Image (tube, rainbow, N blue to C red):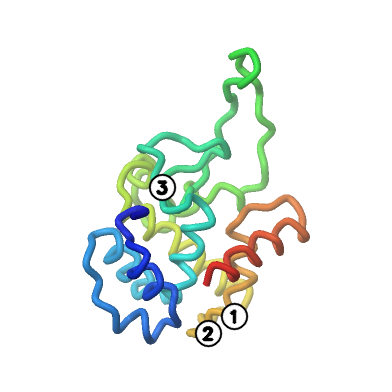
Amino acid sequence: KIYGLTAATLSLCLMPVSASAAAAQTSTEQQAFARAATEFGVPENVLLALAYNESRWESNGNQMSVDGGYGVMDLRTYTPTITSGRDGSQVNVPKKGSAYYTLDQAAAMLHVPASTLETNEQQNVRGAAAVLAADAKQLNDGKLSDNPADWYGAVAEFGGAADAQAASSFADDVYATI
């Protein structure tokens, strides 16, 4: 059982959206994905697969991940220093482009404090869906598609990769999960 999802439920959730929508949503976590997908027009199976590839559906106990992300969607924020795994010293981290910091984008879009997105899984999923939908609209002339294949570019952008090859690799992994 991963993040409240059993293998049987996972297989239902990763089916095409029409089958997944027909499946009974039994847990709070699954309902959060379904609600966020509906609210922001994101195919539910894309949102679920993205979460799986970002965090393996683990929220990390509200602790920051190694890439500065929080929650099941691994929404990222800038952290100017990190602790070295080698010697415990503080190491300065160069700042990336604003598109990398999905936590900051989501907080602005939802008008909620970043701390809420860090600790509240439902809001974390909503935040990711909002960012993903905004990226998809930007890439598709302001339109959102029901076809999961049309979300590939937005998924690649969401991954925060430094180059096109890494972004495609991330998106390929997400789509392999679907």
Q: Earlier in the sequence, mark 3 or mark 1?
A: 3
- Secondary element at image label 3: loop
**Image: 148 above or below 65:** below
Rendered position, 15 above or below 27: below
Q: Residue 106 placed where, x, y %?
A: 45, 54
Q: Residue 15 versus residue 17: which sits nearer the camera?
A: 15
Q: CA distance from mark 3 to mark 1?
A: 27 Å
Residue 140: x and y in percent read 61, 79
Q: Secondary structure at mark 2?
A: loop
Check disc 1 and give the amino acid type: Asp
Q: Which residue is mark 3?
A: 58
Q: Is residue 91 left or right of residue 55?
A: right
Q: Which residue is mark 2?
A: 147
Please tell me whether mark 3 or mark 2 is closer to you in this view: 3
Q: Which quadrant does the N terminus fall into?
A: bottom left
User: Quick one: SS at disc 1?
Assistant: helix
Q: Which mark is residue 67?
A: none
Q: Mark 1 and mark 2 in contact? Answer it, CB < 8 Å.
A: yes
Task: Name the residue beneath numbered marker 1.
Answer: 150
Which residue sits at x=42%, y=76%? 41
For this view, does 11 lie left or right of residue 120?
Answer: right
Mark toward the start of the polypeptide (3 vs 2): 3
Density class for disc 1 (Cα within 10 Å; few <14, some 14-19, many ≥20) is: some
Amino acid on which the number 2 mark rests in the picture? Asn
Which residue is nearer to you in this view: 84 or 133? Answer: 84
Q: CA distance from mark 3 to mark 2?
A: 27 Å
Q: Quadrant of residue 150?
A: bottom right
